[in-house]
Amino acid sequence: MGPVGTAAVRDGGAALPGGFWAAVRVWLEKPQVANRRLCGAAIEAEGTVALDEDEEASGAPLGGAGEGRAAELRGLWREVRGQLPPPLTPLGAPGRGAEVGVALRALLARGRPRAPPAKELAVQDTYNGTVTFLPLEENSEGKYQIKKSNIYQIQLTHVKDEEWSVSIVAPFPENWFSDGITYPKLAWLGNELLPKLAKWSLEQKPSEFKSTLSLISVAKYSNVYQDLKEKYREMVKVWPEVTDPEKFVYEDVAIATYLLILWEEERKEKGLTKKQSFVDLGCGNGLLVHILNNEGHSGRGIDVRRRKIWDMYGPETHLEESTILPGDSHLFPDTDWIIGNHSDELTPWIPVIAARSSYSCCYFVLPCCFFDFHGKYCRRQSKKTQYREYLDFVAQVGFACGFYVEEDCLRIPSTKRVCLIGKNRSYPPSEWAVIDKQITQYINNRQTCAVVGCDRSVGFNHKDRSDSTCKEVGSELPESETDTVGTIWMPGFQPREKVEQIRNCASLPRDFVDDVVLKVANLLLNATPQKSCSNMYCGNVNSWNQGESLSLKEVAESLNKETLQRLKSECGGLQTLLKNNHQVFEVLNGRVHIRDWRTEKPSRKTKPEVKRRLSAEAFKTRLCWFFLHHPDGCSLPSESCPYAHGTEELRASQIIKKKKHRQ
């Protein structure tokens, strides 16, 4: 046996051995969290097998596998167990009837969707604290053989008291074959995988969420995602919006992939041949609608504000600019699915709209920002994270609307990636009127809560809504919508504004911002005795006046009421303005500091190529504030400062030129 590595583990919280098996489970089901060249694993069969060849397995396979797969798994075990090298033969518990757990998994390589997946048989000997991974190869006769060169075993050993060790061993290390994807180098197992397993073994906190892609086939997802990613990758190059193209394009590709597979499975379950129709409420850039239309699903997207990219899609993509007001005038009786993808204030209304559109209408919602029926969602439970609490609320809405609600985690570049799905009803069609009354009562109860907590609610545009949430509905709606007041389900609902107002201090006049920056800087500089320096580059770090740090409250108290009121109207106020002026200030833990560029540390992470290019293009395109205003000048010499020391050093901004060229 060749030791690959051993990690000492100290368990002071009684996490082991249970934590070890939980860690093994992560590696078995989600190997991509450690090996980024994989996109997942598919567990094809799982169960227990008897070590005695004359006995049958005592337990049926897990994960819903039938007796057919159970017999297949037992047959596979009999086929390969005789090929195991003696040191790895599982022993099981002493005595007749010993069993081990076995799982057949397929490893899915990232970027190789059509390549046949590598298969492994994982043998878990709980009694002896080992799990052995046996790579399988299929011969010309269709029988599996163990690829002995790449066998490895993960072991848990109790040393004494709270001391344990996690080890990885390989029986034939000299013959190990690495393909760089499914099987990295042997050193990777010891240097990368082993520390992760040791860490996971002590993490007892259960996840708040379900496993990623738990409701669909991971293998099928991998194939479809790679196809769609290749098909729509050109969108990244021509993206006209100010948002990050790579994030938004590949996120919508991933969501479309999930929906296409989910809908394909639904057609099989219900015996349907026609592809499902949909409406995407709050569709934003419309890319998800564009992809689903292109893939053969009839549907449309509706958003209050038209986006520039809509003009690029062509007539086959159906997008509408319209205000959506939850009510009888916005039902979709001929639509199969209602989609809410980061639908903000419409999020809790998605199940309601689906329930009232028709008995057969389903919904898919991906919550992001926290909204109730009436405005911003207010937390009620401190024992849960805000995100988990909000997901539970949206799921509760679905239950109240008569849906069986399912939850899944998407594989998207976002921290908010849990979706909720309602595709089956919990009541027969004859009880629709009863459920409709139940929905009305539920909404009215939430409205009562909204009025009670009106003074604490925050509006969609982050204003104080104490003067608006409880107004009569006629005063809240756009003039064009007042004729439909009688059909609205909740008086007080505020749709997103048609014209997006910028309230991040970026629209404030430049002279006003400059004046505030200078006042705050002088406040910090004068809070400590002035330190002059005849030679600012003499190497004495203390010779340059760094000023004092003051709390945001202290800084705010130094400004007049008119200035503070003007800042407050800009969503974030003083702190936002100071953070926007990153060149001059640093705001840490509620305290404001003068930024000292000599102490700036380069980022540990390598910046993406796009950001590196933007940094280079912005070099010396703005004047150095310290060179102009600080009593000691800039703390950096001209050649080291990213800002221009005088107008003669100024360069024309390449970024601006490119924007003008696109226009």
Image: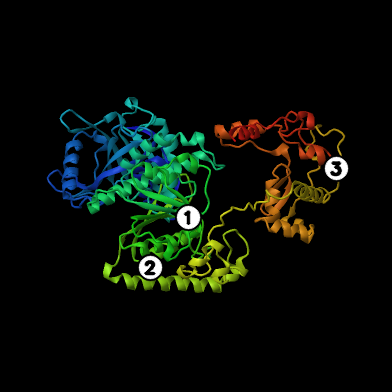
Q: Residue furthest top?
A: 174
Is residue 536 shown above or below 546?
A: above
Callout 3 crowding tier (Cα within 10 Å): few <14, some 14–19, many ≥20: some
Rendered image: mark on residue 400: 2
Q: What x and y, as percent, mark residue 175?
A: 32, 25
Name which residue type carries label 1.
Ser
Is residue 436 shown above or below 573?
A: below
Judge from the rendering whether residue 366 lies leftward or rightward of residue 266; answer left or right: right
Upstream in the sequence, badge 1 or badge 2? 1
The residue under label 1 is 343
Name which residue type carries label 3.
Lys
Name which residue type carries label 2.
Ala
Report if the CB atoms under discs 1 and 3 are less than 8 Å apart.
no
Mark 1 or 3, closer to the camera = 1
Identify which residue is drawn at 36% across, 41% down: 40
Residue 410 showing in the rendered view: yes
Give how far apart the Cα atoms at labels 1 and 3 are. Answer: 54 Å
Upstream in the sequence, badge 1 or badge 3? 1
The residue under label 3 is 531
Callout 1 crowding tier (Cα within 10 Å): few <14, some 14–19, many ≥20: many
Q: What x and y, as percent, mark residue 235?
A: 47, 36
Element type at mark 3: loop
Q: What x and y, as percent, mark residue 604?
A: 58, 37
Q: Nearer the viewer, residue 194 or 640?
A: 640
Judge from the rendering whether residue 338 lies leftward or rightward of residue 590; answer left or right: left
Colour scheme of the picture: rainbow
